[in-house]
Image (cartoon, rainbow, N blue to C red):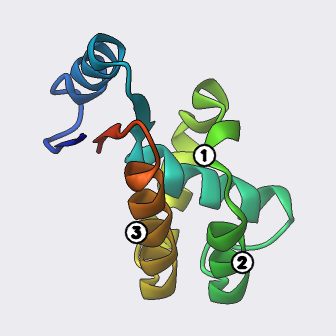
Amino acid sequence: MIIAIDGPAASGKGTLGKRLAAHYGLRHLDTGLLYRAVAKAVLDAGHSPGDNAQAVAAARALDPARLDEVALKSHAIGEAASRVSAIPEVREALFDLQRSFAKAAPGAVLDG
């Protein structure tokens, strides 16, 4: 089973997603955190979020099991995430990651 939840910021997607995942015994992924994680990885490596090659490499190396929600919620990371999310190759890499995450047993709830 795959459940996808979409909506505006602060509309309850995450809360609902976590509850549905717990109820059905599924894994949960906040897809918005993926872009933030890419941005943080690029910044932590000392690069600009507009550095396409670094952003794509970070997106391809991302492990969703290692997302630190607290560290990724800062304003600076959010601004950098906006920049990396505009890179088509980053979007493609993260789409592939989301697809793989959702297809793995027993299924998943994705929100973002």
The answer to which of marks 1 and 2 sits earlier in the sequence is 2
Front residue (pair 54, 66): 66
Name the image quarter holding residue 106: top left
Locate residue 67, reporting x and y percent.
Answer: 64, 38
**In this rendering, the label closer to the viewer, 1 or 2:** 1
Q: Residue at x 86, y 66 (%)?
A: 46
Please name the residue that numbered disc 3 is placed on: 95
The secondary structure type at the circle numbered 3 is helix
Q: Amino acid at mark 1?
A: Pro
Residue 7 as seen in the image, left or right of residue 94: left
Query: Quadrant location of the N terminus?
Result: top left
**In this rendering, the label closer to the viewer, 2 or 3:** 3
Q: Amino acid at mark 2?
A: Ala
Please name the residue that numbered disc 1 is placed on: 64
Locate residue 18, reporting x and y percent.
Answer: 34, 19
Neighbours of disc 1 within 10 Å: few (<14), some (14-19), many (20+): some
Q: Residue at x 19, y 22 (%)?
A: 12
Locate residue 79, reporting x and y percent.
Answer: 49, 55
The residue sitting at the right extreme is: 45
Q: Amino acid at mark 3?
A: Phe
Mark 2 and mark 3: Cα distance apart in space: 14 Å
Position of residue 74 relative to residue 20, above or below, is below
Neighbours of disc 2 within 10 Å: few (<14), some (14-19), many (20+): some
The secondary structure type at the circle numbered 1 is helix
The secondary structure type at the circle numbered 2 is helix
Residue 108: mark: none
The answer to which of marks 1 and 3 sits earlier in the sequence is 1
Please name the residue that numbered disc 2 is placed on: 57
